[in-house]
Amino acid sequence: MTTTTHWTKKHIISLEDFSKEEYDTVLNTAASFRDVLKSRTKKVPALQGQVVANMFFEPSTRTRSSFELAAKRLSADILNFAPSSSSLTKGETILDTAKTYLAMGANIMVIRHSHSGVPLNIAQEMDRLKTGVSIFNAGDGLHQHPSQGLLDLFTLTNLLDPKNPRTDLLKRKKIAIVGDIIHSRVARSNINSLLTAGAHLHLAAPPTLLPNLFADTVKSEHKDRLFIHWHLEPALENADFVMTLRLQKERMADYLLPSLREYHQLFGITRDRLLLCNPDVKVLHPGPVNRGVELSSDLMDDERLSLISDQVTSGVAVRMALLYLIGNLKQETNPQILPTV
Amino acid sequence: MTTTTHWTKKHIISLEDFSKEEYDTVLNTAASFRDVLKSRTKKVPALQGQVVANMFFEPSTRTRSSFELAAKRLSADILNFAPSSSSLTKGETILDTAKTYLAMGANIMVIRHSHSGVPLNIAQEMDRLKTGVSIFNAGDGLHQHPSQGLLDLFTLTNLLDPKNPRTDLLKRKKIAIVGDIIHSRVARSNINSLLTAGAHLHLAAPPTLLPNLFADTVKSEHKDRLFIHWHLEPALENADFVMTLRLQKERMADYLLPSLREYHQLFGITRDRLLLCNPDVKVLHPGPVNRGVELSSDLMDDERLSLISDQVTSGVAVRMALLYLIGNLKQETNPQILPTV
Amino acid sequence: MTTTTHWTKKHIISLEDFSKEEYDTVLNTAASFRDVLKSRTKKVPALQGQVVANMFFEPSTRTRSSFELAAKRLSADILNFAPSSSSLTKGETILDTAKTYLAMGANIMVIRHSHSGVPLNIAQEMDRLKTGVSIFNAGDGLHQHPSQGLLDLFTLTNLLDPKNPRTDLLKRKKIAIVGDIIHSRVARSNINSLLTAGAHLHLAAPPTLLPNLFADTVKSEHKDRLFIHWHLEPALENADFVMTLRLQKERMADYLLPSLREYHQLFGITRDRLLLCNPDVKVLHPGPVNRGVELSSDLMDDERLSLISDQVTSGVAVRMALLYLIGNLKQETNPQILPTV
């Protein structure tokens, strides 16, 4: 890896302001860690002595484990914050909790919270106090889930060219995003990254989950590559990739969906429906899947069509890359520290 | 340790199909790790870079901690799956959870589940998918708890000959197993190992907890060494070891037991009752003990009579041995890697 | 660091019997670890191979994380005991749980429990059994929280002379302790250490939270330096430090307090009230703070006045020092092992 990486972000909060160069740096660095994970020892000393605090105010096994493993592979020390047994029940504010971990020596705080904006607020406060700590948004409300967006980007580009995964590979690719888009932080992050990469995005969902206004949320220079559909078929036609989103079953109680069965009939992805797509089409899902709702069960288990496992595997490499990039920012990012396996 | 170990098991699911040679390999390997644990550093790099995922769908402190410490001593990375804060509540199947950990890089999954057969099912599916991952049953429903059976075997044989613990030491020993046998996965695993080792097994319990049919579950070549008693005394007479089992207090609600007090009067082990046994008799219990129910409280604390602490200590060494054996299977088990302390 | 440390305590249970020399040894050792934590690697191999079992029967994030990080920085292996998923629900006694961790190989048990005396009882039993294990009280009921007392002592003396923090620095300093003193194990530990250091202590609280009898609990040679006030002002006048205590909101239900608002009006610390103190006054709080109750919110965030973050930072260094001192006791405490950074 000879590319000189230019990285200036101290926090990972949102993909809204990621540049094409930043995406490519992440993809490039993640490819390097993908190779580390295939090696025998699987570990690099890149974050030795640093403390990564996992602060998951919203429960999660999958994402927390992925961050934990990524941090361990970088030789960081990890502190797990368990909200149930926490002082939050004792009336402390989230910022006070963050300051406590800061005072204990945390260098990076990975924060998941059900309210949009919490990671950003903490990052701003940490900067105001000149603490030097990095905040990593692991999912905030309906806002953003940047590491999911980046691991999806890596999964796609790594499939297209494992030797050199880069945004350019997605130029003019047709990508369908199907499901509960309006409530999905995953969709929001993916829309940012895929449009910047140059893809054509076709969103498909019932109108209650995808209001027309949604198109106004993207940058004007990207508008001509974003298409909104209230039916599945036009989104799937000749698509190169189909991204499905997790359906929060609770939404039904909100009268946004008639029933899970009807949802599956209208928007569920099946083998038959994939015949509309490009013959090499692949399906993604951030997990956990409601089998038989977003995807038919047999499709989910078909390794030739589903990239779900690749997404999980990519997750560890991409999170290693991001922790590495923000964790080594202070002493000038030095690409030579990166292992050459 | 110069014995060449022949080990072919990729998963640890049940002791039903363990051969005498396999038991001896485990005992021999565990003796080696027992010595590692007595050394200053207590750690070997045998599983460096490997990921052990602890997936306890049934709560457990004791067993989970023992596995965790064993994996740490082998330098593995550990992922703890916490079912309460997990995506199971989000509708994912257990197999999906296992596949997620697989995709993250898990090499060994330690699974405890309240339903019999779950670890076997996952192992079969993992093999069908040619994943190379090892499944370690840490207790499944009423079925099996193989590492408990093996640590009990090690505790007994290590007491009889610490230099060379081996199954032959138990040939013709009289061992009583007392208590809630029908609901005990610990009893099932111990019956497999102790009968294969050549011991004479005397089971004692009230008929509701030990139906006569139970004898039909063992191999025909072992039948003449298995005895069923509905009274305690004949089981204890000249016994070399007495294994007690944990009584699930909930059973009483099922009308299987009149009261804990009456149970203790009829089947509780006390100093007095031990006078019926061989003078060197020792008592075992898998823990946690209901003091004054399965065992009198003073007996439990008497280090000359109770092997309960030895069982816990053996647990770490035996689990290290098992993780080592299955974790090093791929690249041909090589006994030289084992430390000679 | 050339001081030869004389340390004989195997357990950390209470500050009631700490001598001036012992306090100074802790301060001195903590200063050394404070420097380790400022170094690049932040880790020393002092407890390599040793197992620290965190047994928090009372939930705590802050203190548990601090102990966990301290143990990791000393290269110990850590076992976390999670009471909710534990065998305590299965009828095991606390002592049985401790014996189980002992048998697994625990060298130090860090115990927090809502009942006063639990750590002492376990320590006595562990000594009676000649186990060699060390018990570290991480807070027991209303009794003691020795590591909090010691980290407060370190915070104060380290502020006064970072090169050589020592008890003498507090001689004749006026320190106010304000709040729910009768229910505070933090206050009890601090009263022990600060009086031994030679400070003048002024306790201030409503009479329900500070009965006159309280003065009888301190050693007679210290009595002339302990003052009890039912009003805030005389305690603050010319004070060098103000220690505030966390108010358990549940107390109000016990009719010990009229309302949180009234409490804040009478005993809450604000910028205005600090004008009564010595101009260099600093405020402490063990956390988590009820903002606007014990302290005004703006005061808490004022780094020139508040030592709250320093307390948390000191916590890691002081706990490293204590784990180091008790963990290296067996083979004769050897100050040369200590890193010279």
Image (spheres, coloured by chain):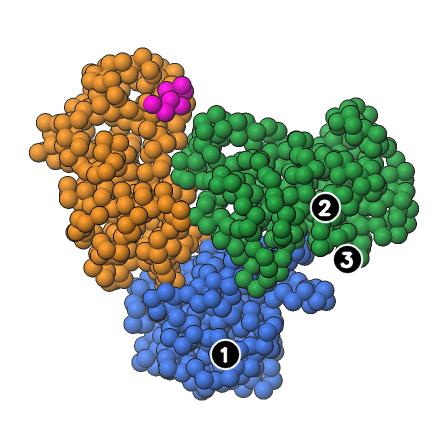
Chain colours: A green, B blue, C orange
Picture mark count = 3
Seen in the image, is C230 located left or right of residue B116?
A: left
Question: Label 1 lies in what chain?
Answer: B
Element type at mark 2: loop
Q: Quadrant of residue A182?
A: top right
Q: Are marks 2 and 1 in contact (CB under 8 Å)?
A: no
Estimate the x, y position of residue B297 in percent, counting from the top left.
33, 62
Nearest-to-viewer mark from 2 and 1: 2
> Is residue A140 visible in the rendered structure shown here?
yes
Name the residue carrying label 3: A303
Question: Label 2 lies in what chain?
Answer: A
Q: Are marks 3 and 1 in contact (CB under 8 Å)?
A: no
Q: Quadrant of residue B268?
A: bottom left
| Mark 2 to mark 1 CA distance (whole Å) | 45 Å
- Crowding at dot 3, Cα within 10 Å, few <14 / some 14-19 / many 20+, comes out as some
> Is residue B211 visible in the rendered structure shown here?
no
Estimate the x, y position of residue A295 in percent, counting from the top left.
79, 47
Q: What type is the residue that disc 2 sits on?
A: Arg
| Mark 3 to mark 1 CA distance (whole Å) | 37 Å
B186 up-or-down from C10: above or below: below
Q: Nearer the viewer, residue B333 or C225?
A: B333
Q: What type is the residue that disc 3 sits on?
A: Glu
Seen in the image, is B339 located left or right of residue B59?
A: left
- Crowding at dot 2, Cα within 10 Å, few <14 / some 14-19 / many 20+, comes out as many
Q: Which mark is residue A166?
A: 2
Seen in the image, is C53 located left or right of residue A311?
A: left
- Crowding at dot 1, Cα within 10 Å, few <14 / some 14-19 / many 20+, comes out as some
Q: What type is the residue that disc 1 sits on?
A: Pro
Magenta span:
C297-304
Element type at mark 3: loop
| Mark 3 to mark 2 CA distance (whole Å) | 23 Å
Question: Label 3 lies in what chain?
Answer: A
